[in-house]
Image (cartoon, rainbow, N blue to C red):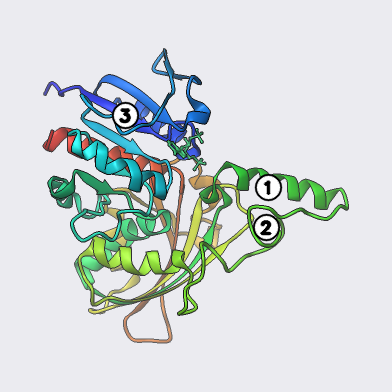
Amino acid sequence: MVEKKLNVIVAGATGAVGAQMLTCLEEQSFPINNFKLLASSRSAGKKIKFRDETFVVEEMTKNSFKGYDIALFSAGGSTSLEFAPASAEAGCVVVDNSSAWRMDTDIPLVVPEVNPDAVAQYKNKGIIANPNCSTIQMVVALNPIYRNFGIKRLVISTYQAVSGSGVKAVNELREQVRAVMEGKSPVAKVYPHPIAFNALPHIDSFLDSGYSKEEMKMVNETRKILNDETIMITATAVRVPVFNSHSESVNIETKEHATCEQIRGVLNTAPGVKVLDDPQNNVYPLALDAHGNDLTFVGRIRQDLSIENGIDIWIVSDNIRKGAATNTVQIGRLLAEKYL
Ligand code: A2P
């Protein structure tokens, strides 16, 4: 099949996720005709190499989108609220990595391994939302369990890498580690407390309920992607001094009883999942191993001894790749192949 080549924009091309999107577009041999890189006025004129060509970054304006088919956005929530409708209006479909549009009932929230058909709803507003990083990797692993055994309740604890807070946070961890090793006091700017040698039960801002916004993203987005409002979910989101890749402990109460062997069986054949589960030989998913990979790794699969239908699993994935850039580019590819 000869693929139609599309006119593609990357909006937020100078950011951490934007840069990864460029890598993913290269790796996935995305069918591109015209290509444009957008960022703020601060980066206009900056040169970025892509597929052996040099592109000059342009300032994003509401006139940036005419004649283009797809805009992959990773430029923050407020920027997306301002510019995504102008892009859609110009006929350039937006795949947005921010949280701005995720819970809009007219806008699909897509993880290609889980709900690819939802992409068709792009026609509503010309925008598709990419879910939160912690949610993406979790639903990739949960979907086969949900489809085969049903899910009644989830109890989630996350161990999230600093790369999820951007380049500044990565530098802050590095500098704080160095400071502590040199006997100096670590300086905290990105986070309210030192992240080096620490664990912060605080991601995004807190709501009146006592949950953080990050925790409620996992609750609400999981229900939307699985299209099931009945799943009971509680989450604790924790930032840990890991550079990249999020880890998650997830306790699952299934509707039907499932043995560990059955859970391993459905995970082994699930798209995007790799089971690493031989704890006796120290084999289980690790953040360092997931780094640079597009798969979601699952291990420590065991029966929860405290309830009848309970399973505990440990899920790890590269939050900048599958949790952001890879998933966005995969959605773009689905659009390109089936709808544009
Ligand atoms: P810039 O580099 O010019 O600030 P990160 O999340 O890693 O900080 O990246 C955010 C991305 O979003 C960057 O590419 C940034 O561009 C871009 N961005 C931020 N604000 C705007 C804006 N008002 N218009 C266009 N791009 C923006």
Percent x, y of residue 281 = 54, 58
Tell me the SS state at disc 3.
strand
Residue for badge 1: 172
Q: Quadrant of the N terminus?
A: top left
Residue 27 versus residue 273: which sits nearer the camera?
A: 27
Q: Residue at x 23, y 77 (%)?
A: 230
Tell me the SS state at disc 1.
helix
Is residue 24 left or right of 149 when viewed as pictured? right
Question: Taking 102 as reference, is 30 above or below it?
Answer: above
Whole-number angstrom distance, CA of label 3 to CA of label 2: 35 Å
- Residue 195 - label: 2
Q: From the image, state whether disc 3 or disc 1 is nearer to you.
A: 3
Tag 3: amino acid: Ile
- Asked whether residue 284 appears in the rendered view, the answer is no
Is residue 53 left or right of 158 when viewed as pictured? left
Residue 12 versus residue 182: which sits nearer the camera?
A: 12
Is residue 51 left or right of 182 when viewed as pictured? left
Q: From the image, state whether disc 3 or disc 2 is nearer to you.
A: 3
Residue for badge 3: 9
Which of the marked residues, 1 or 2, is nearer the chain's N terminus? 1
Which image quadrant is residue 10 in? top left
Q: Residue furthest right?
A: 183
Which of the marked residues, 3 or 1, is nearer the chain's N terminus? 3
Q: Quadrant of the C terminus?
A: top left
Question: Taking 245 as reference, is 146 above or below it?
Answer: below
Q: Residue at x 30, y 56 (%)?
A: 102
